[in-house]
Structures are given as C-alpha cells and as structure tokens.
Amino acid sequence: MKNNDILLFNLHRKYVNQESFHGGFSGIYLIAAFIEENGFEGQAYAGLLADGKKLIDYACANGIVKVVGLYCDFDNVTENIFLSNYIKEQYGLPVIVGGPQATALGADFFECSACDAIVRYEGELTVLDLMRYFVDGIGDLSAIKGISYYKDGVVHINTERPLIENLDSLPFLDSRFSLDDKFRQCEANIMTGRGCPFHCSFCHEGHHTRKVRFRSVENVLQEVDQFLETLGDREGFICFTDDTFTLVPERVKGICEGLAKRREKYNFEWFCEGHIHTLYLHPEMIDYLVAGGINTLQLGIESGVQSILDAYRKGCTLDEIRDVIVKCESKGINHVYGNIILGGPGYSAEAYEQHLEFAKELYLLSKGILNMNVVSCWPLPETDITCNPEKYNLKIVDYDFLTSSSDFPMIEVGGMGVWDICVQSNDMKKALDQHILDMYHKRLVPEDRIIKWMKHYLETGSDTYWLYVLRNANPALYGYYCMLNSNDIVSLADLLEDELWDYHPMRVESLYNNCYLKDSKFVVYGHVLSELERELVRYSLGRLSLYDIVDLFIQKNSWTKSDAMKMVREGIKSLADKRAVVFSKY
Ligand code: B12
Ligand code: SF4
C-alpha cells in the first residue's frame, strides 16, 4: 500500500451469507481520482467489513494515511459507527462520512460515531476542501460548503454546494485508485449521467435528484475505450450504473453505436437500467440497445396494480409495462430483470394475487427473457413513503433497518404483518418458479432460446435464472441441452419425417442416475414411462438407427413392419417430447 492522504471505504458486514458487491458504487473511487488531479493522494476499497478493517489497521499503524472516508448507505450505518469510533480512538485520525445516506444522518450519528464531518450530496469538490482543511490546515469547517459537522451539541448544516455541471470534467477510474487488485480487471461500472427525472415515492434518488446531468457520448466512449484496452483477451463486462440510462433517444443511440463498433474488436457484454415510460414512448431505444449488444436490461416494474403504481408515482401504466416486455422480447433483448415490490401503499391479500397474476402474465409475454425478483417496500430515509407513511396507510415498524439487510420487510400494511409479507415474498418466488416450469412443459419458451442459454452456460459458466430453475427441477434436462450443443446432434423437431428413420436416437443421461420407483411405477428422467417407452429408451444409445430398432422390435414381438414403425414412431415422439432423447446421424 502506498502513502495516501485519504483512504476511502465502502464496507458492509457479510450479511445473510452474501459477499459484498459494492464495488459497483463508484463514488469513493471517483473521489480518490478527483483529489489526485488536485494534488492529493487517495485510494479506495469496497468489500467486507473485516477485510476493510485489516487494511485500515495496516495503513493507520504504519502512518501512511492522514484522513479516512467512509461511504454510508442505509445498509452500513452501524458498520460506520463502529469504524469511525475505532479509527478515532485507536489512531486519532479525522473521519469523514459521505454517500447516499449522508443527508439523513443527524445528531445521533455524530454522537455515536464521533466522526468529524458529513459530506452531503456530491463529494468531489467538498472532499477537496476537507483535505485542504485536515491535511494542510487551510480554512475552517464552518466555511466548507456541502458539509454538516457537530459542535457544542449542535449539528451545523452548511450551505449546499452547487452541483458539478460539466460531468466531462471528472476523471476516469482505473486500478490505481483501488486498494484491491480486482478493481476494473474485467468489469467496469460506468455512470454516464447523474440523477433521475422521476420522483418515485419509495426511492432515495427520486427524492434527491435536483437536476439530471449527462456526460457527452464522446466522453463516455473514451472511458469505455480506456477500460477495454486493459482487457486483452479476457471477456469484459460493463455495468452502466445510471439510475435511468434510457432517457434521451439520441444519446442512447450514440452510446450504443459506439459500443457496437467496439464489440467488433473486443469481447464484452453490458448492462443498463431502463424506464418503462421512456421506452414505451421511444421503442426505438430498444433497437439501439439490441444493436449495441446489451446483455441485460433492468426495468422498474414494481407492481401489478395500477393504483399502487400511481401511489409509487412510477409514471407508467400496466399496459405500458406489457408493451415494453413484448417489444424487448420481439426485438431481441436477451435478458430483462425487474422487481415486484410487496407491502407498499395499497397492498392487501388481494393485491398479492394481482401482483402474482401480473408477474405470470409478464413471464408469458416475455417467453423466457424476464426474471422477476420479489422484494418488499423499504423505508429509505427522506422518501415520501418514509416521511408520510400515514398518507399511504403504512405502518413503518423499523425505520433504522435494524432488522433487515434488504431481506426482510419493515413495513406493515393491509392487515399484514412483516412476517406475513415475508412469507408472501417466498410464496411468490416459488409460484413464479413453478410458472417457469409450466411454461416450459407447455413449450411456451422457444427451444432455440434454451439451447442458446445452455451454450452460453457451457462456454462461460454463467447461468440464466430460467435455465437454473429448469435444470434444478429435472437434472436430465442438463444432459438434453448439453447433447443438443454437441456437433451433429439434433432434436426431433429438426428432422424431416423421411430422414428420421436413418437417425440414431440417444438418451440424454445415465439411466442409473435418473431412474426410480414411485407407486410401483418406473420414473425415468422425471417421467413415468410406458413399457414401450422404457424399451425404446434402453436401445436409444446411438448404436442403432430407428430402422435398426424397428427390425429388433419386429423380431422380439412378432409385429408387422407397419405396426412396428407406427409404435416406434409414437414412442420415440413421446420420448422426444419429454426431452429424453436426441438424434445423431451416425
Ligand atoms: C449502481 C447501483 C446499484 C447496483 C450496483 C452495481 C454493481 N455492479 O455493483 C445494484 C443494482 C447491484 C444495486 C443494488 C441495490 N441498490 Co443501488 N444503486 C446504484 C446506483 C444507481 C448507482 C451507484 C453509483 O455508482 N453512484 C455514482 C456515485 C458517483 O454516486 P455516489 O455513490 O452517491 O457517490 C457520491 C456521493 O454520495 C459522495 N460519496 C460517496 N461515497 C462517499 C464517501 C465519502 C467518505 C464522502 C466524503 C463522500 C462520498 O460522493 C460521490 C461522488 O459525488 C445508486 C443510485 C445513485 N445514483 O447513486 C443506487 C443506490 C445506491 N442503491 C440503493 C439501493 C436501495 C439498492 C438496493 C437495496 C436496491 C434493491 N432493490 O435491491 C440494492 C442493495 C444493494 C446493497 N446490498 O446495498 C439506494 C441506496 C439508498 C440509501 N439511502 O442508502 C440508491 C441510492 C438508489 C435509490 N434507491 O435511491 N444498486
Ligand atoms: S425511476 Fe428509478 S431511479 Fe428514478 S426515482 Fe423512480 S425508482 Fe428512483
């Protein structure tokens, strides 16, 4: 670790057995890069509390840091209270705190954490002033715009700092600003604009954004180039972290055209978040995203009840959601990811059913491209829902997130308690998984899509949620689609009637591992097979063609040729429908 004027940390406990993935929140790295341009040295680290604390101990004990900065969101307030006290008591260094939660931190936090200053809103320019104060002894806390500080038992909130208008003036990120050598190795998080023009009642950004600002297309693509040049032969991923990437069609077009060009030379995929209403009004943006090679589009779906969407101030209708999902599917988006929020305004047992039905309907429309996550409504600080719960008939039972790390409800509504809503969330996930299986069995997911997922899975190890559900429900399906991804192996649907007989049927997995007795019936690959099907699957190893099998059955059963062909034809079709056999030419 080099000498630094400031070290910045975004640290979380290992909550609910999850690894921390906060490297995507680029604020701390940007501050490090910005102050370096202005004569100070800084590095940042996002990860688990225990790992970050080790780095802090090392830097502080060796005197190679002068100020420590802590990123704070709704999820790591208690971590920051611990860290701030620890750093101040153990090493006597100044501690500053910033991040999305900063504007909600008041006297309690100052008292519990003993931190020196809180940076409200954007941090770059404000941290620079704080560095001049703490490191060079220039200025006075009372004169630094954009901070709050605690003195004589009073929280002083200084005047707000004007926003950075020209985002192109900000530096690009690279691994120099990270304490972690994994930073930007194969994945880059790039924000192309700041703020969101919508004002959803449950969203922190919806409350905070005062003005949306964009980087120029050229500036964004320059940062993309800088990242891609470090990739070499490796596959890269770019996560565009804008709250809403799909705001201005011309801009989206420019960025996507630039990405398409770069995909000719580099191997990378990318993600962004879109808004239903803007995509509904400008569906051409979906074409741009597809042409640019998007891998996953995240959409704020949130609810299946119009009055609830209205209470969220989502600015879109259920029909718009349907329309956008259909267009995403037909225009070729590979994956769409969306949330359904339970336990928000107007929620009830009936609303649960409506949400579930709507989610199922969207799954049908999406034909396998949509994955819905089920979450509950959270009382994020300063949002309209949190400030005025009575307006929405909500009862907030845990304002401080003491009982939840995005994994448990904190609001009661419609006669339902937090545990009821928690159970509903689990029920809905299970019901949606079952719906995936039902759609699959009814062949409502295009087969070539599943084969494509499997190919990608085999090549890269990266799964899609639908494939994961299908494989878990019936492990033999893994074999089926693996076989179909092998050379010269096809499914029945790929064969013409007259060529079928020359082909060699092949079962897809070991029978030892996929055969059991249930109610005195043999279950093979998850299906109860007829005696004929069982005989056919025995001989479907690829050694015999269908003609050979017909001959064998004639000898064994004294059938006429036409009867044998009819029986074998029907049996093999039934096995193929169950995805139990594939066909090889040889
Ligand atoms: C990208 C993103 C994600 C991605 C991360 C992608 C990845 N690859 O890792 C994903 C999709 C995973 C995600 C998930 C979630 N997210 Co999110 N996410 C964002 C988003 C859109 C961008 C973050 C970012 O890079 N911002 C850009 C930088 C420049 O801004 P910044 O981080 O705020 O930093 C500036 C200042 O805050 C300040 N600053 C920051 N750190 C520090 C530190 C110090 C010491 C100082 C002085 C200053 C300072 O200066 C910085 C530069 O100006 C933000 C919204 C937003 N616009 O910020 C939400 C946001 C951070 N997420 C939020 C939430 C709620 C979530 C989820 C719970 C949502 C969900 N439904 O699951 C999950 C939970 C994640 C978790 N366990 O914490 C909230 C947090 C609200 C809060 N009060 O804490 C935000 C603000 C969005 C919102 N709803 O309003 N998210
Ligand atoms: S559109 Fe998304 S980012 Fe914007 S206010 Fe609504 S939820 Fe927040």
Image: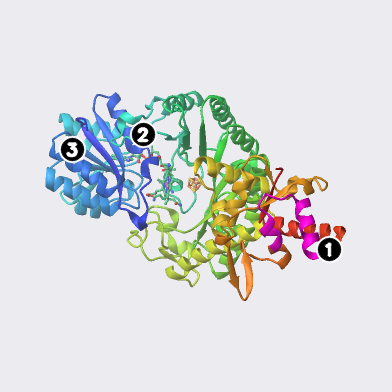
Q: Nearer the viewer, residue 369 or 219?
A: 369
Segment tinted magenta in the rendering:
535-557
Q: Residue at x 20, y 46 (%)?
A: 115
Q: Nearer the viewer, residue 457 or 194?
A: 457
By secondary structure, the bulk of the magenta-drawn segment is best described as helix
Residue 538 within the segment the image draws in magenta: yes
Quadrant, the N terminus: top left
Residue that label 2 marks: 162
> Looking at the picture, does residue 31 appear above or below residue 584?
above
Which of marks 2 and 1 precedes in the sequence? 2
Q: Position of residue 33 (x, y in %)?
A: 32, 29
Q: Position of residue 299 (x, y in %)?
A: 55, 47
* Circle number at residue 59: 3
> Looking at the picture, does residue 180 appear above or below residue 352?
above
The answer to whether residue 57 shows anywhere in this view is yes
Residue that label 1 marks: 559
Q: Determine the quadrant in which ligand 1 lies.
A: top left
Query: Does the Cβ of the disc 2 residue fall within 8 Å of ligand 1?
Result: no
Q: Label 1, label 2: how many angstroms apart (C-alpha)?
A: 89 Å
Q: How many marks?
A: 3
Indicate the amino acid at tag 2.
Pro
Q: Position of residue 484 (x, y in %)?
A: 64, 46
Residue 275 within the segment the image draws in magenta: no
Q: Label 3: few (<14), some or many (≥20) within 10 Å? A: some
Indicate the amino acid at tag 1.
Trp
> Looking at the picture, does residue 408 appear above or below residue 331?
below
Q: Label 1: few (<14), some or many (≥20) within 10 Å? A: some
Secondary structure category for the residue under label 3 = helix
Q: Nearer the viewer, residue 280 or 421?
A: 421
Secondary structure category for the residue under label 2 = loop
Query: Does the Cβ of the disc 3 residue fall within 8 Å of ligand 1?
Result: no
Q: Nearer the viewer, residue 1 or 492?
A: 492
